[in-house]
Amino acid sequence: MSESIIKVSGLGKKYIISHEASGKYTTLRDAIGRNIKSWIGSSQRNVSREEFWALRDIYFSINRGDAVGIVGRNGAGKSTLLKVLSRITEPSHGKVEINGRIASLLEVGTGFHQELTGRENIFLNGAILGMSRAEVRAKFDEIVDFSGVETFLDTPVKRYSSGMYVRLAFAVAAHLEPEILVVDEVLAVGDAEFQKKCLGKMDDVSRNQGRTVLFVSHNISAIQQLCNKGIYLERGKLVMQGGIDEVVDRYVSEGTNNTFTKEPKGDISVTHAEIDKRVNGDLMTVTLYIRSNIQSSMPVSIDFRFYTLTQVPVGFASIGTFDYEKQVNLVHGDNKIIATVDVNTFAIGNYLLNIDVTRPNVEYYDRIEDHLSFEIVKETEENRSLQQSWNYGSVQLNATIKQVN
Ligand SMILES: Nc1ncnc2c1ncn2[C@@H]1O[C@H](COP(=O)(O)OP(=O)(O)OP(=O)(O)O)[C@@H](O)[C@H]1O
């Protein structure tokens, strides 16, 4: 039976935000006309304070050995949750029970002491995790190897570049055998190769060593690759906890719609896009408003990239990329374009559509990414009861049969 290693009940985290009230710049001369006393009072207390709940009424539990991805939009409370779990900040309400040693990698190198060298910080962190010097020594070479900062081991970490810092911090957190490893978005600091290495190590920690990993990232495919469970936060509330695929599906579909509008930016930009919400046939209509600030007319290609809700690429269609004759000639000012895409080969289900406006091999003008979604239904009288009840994959294949008895 799986055993709960983290249990959170009724958790709330409140911040007090200070606003500077208007009237801050009231001059003395203005004030003399009024009551001097109240002016002195207001100049001292012109800052109003407001309570803000970054997390509210959160309940969940995590089992030993789970790798949990925490998703949510900017400001949803993901980092705050990890800080509370790592005891960097106190909850304002509720209870957090943790039955294991926790190592956190939040905001680059939490737990590192600036004045100490890399070597000293490795031992310090080991001690914080309750390890003996001999235990840390046994892990030391592995940590140094992984981090690649060997030549700087005896330099205070305050002199490290941010890349070196995060390499060592990750190596320490992942190798010092915590029972729970908490990692917040820090991988964004390292280069692609290091990111891959970190993901591999986190996978090893959770899958092979059976330890628990909590991971916050905006990189959904990294989350899916690494995690088996998910937690979805929105504006400080828990929307859903469950298997990672279900959680990511819900998160992605709630952030998308069949229309998208944005401010024009750059030479050529899509200001509005609209696609069919449900496609019950072969053809989907895509309407685009494209603003061109280029004086002369400009031929562009429009590419449609289709993905599952979990960001697996499914298909590609293009106007103009493979055949320049078919490019769209944009005029200076606003252009309205209506395209039709044959989506007959898609299986029923929900999909994402990303749209690129480009001059192939020359320039990317604009891109609509992770905003548009639609549903393929293929509904008929007979099959209505089948809709949504199966997982049909992403591609509809045709089969023929010949009975030969
Ligand atoms: N020390 C603080 N004082 C006041 N408000 C804070 C503090 N820390 C965070 N907040 C607020 O709490 C909310 C949640 O922030 P948090 O950083 O946890 O979100 P997040 O989901 O990690 O966002 P992102 O994806 O942008 O990193 C935000 O509105 C943020 O402005």
Image (cartoon, helix red, strand yellow):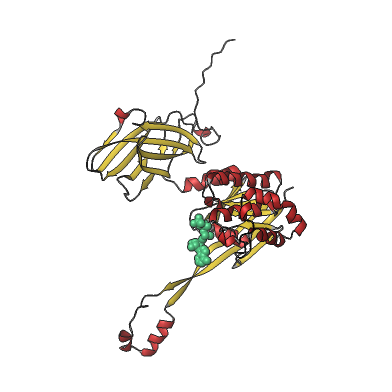
Residue 352 is at least partly visible in this image = yes
Q: Is residue 223 left or right of 291 when viewed as pictured?
A: right
Q: Quadrant of residue 26?
A: bottom left
Q: Quadrant of residue 13?
A: bottom right
Residue at x 54%, y 43% (from the top left corner): 221
Q: Is residue 130 left or right of 281 when viewed as pictured?
A: right
Residue at x 74%, y 55% (from the top left corner): 137
Q: Residue 86: horizontal and vertical position, in percent?
A: 63, 61
Q: Residue 148: horizontal and vertical position, in percent?
A: 61, 49
Location of the C terminus by quadrant is: top right
Residue at x 30%, y 86% (from the top left corner): 29
Q: Nearer the viewer, residue 377 or 64?
A: 64
Residue at x 74%, y 60% (from the top left corner): 130
Q: Is residue 66 left or right of 403 when viewed as pictured?
A: right
Q: Quadrant of residue 290?
A: top left
Residue 64 is at least partly visible in this image = no
Looking at the picture, does residue 190 appear above or below residue 43?
above
Instruction: Report the label total.
Output: 0
Q: Residue 46: horizontal and vertical position, in percent?
A: 42, 78
Q: Residue 90: horizontal and vertical position, in percent?
A: 61, 67
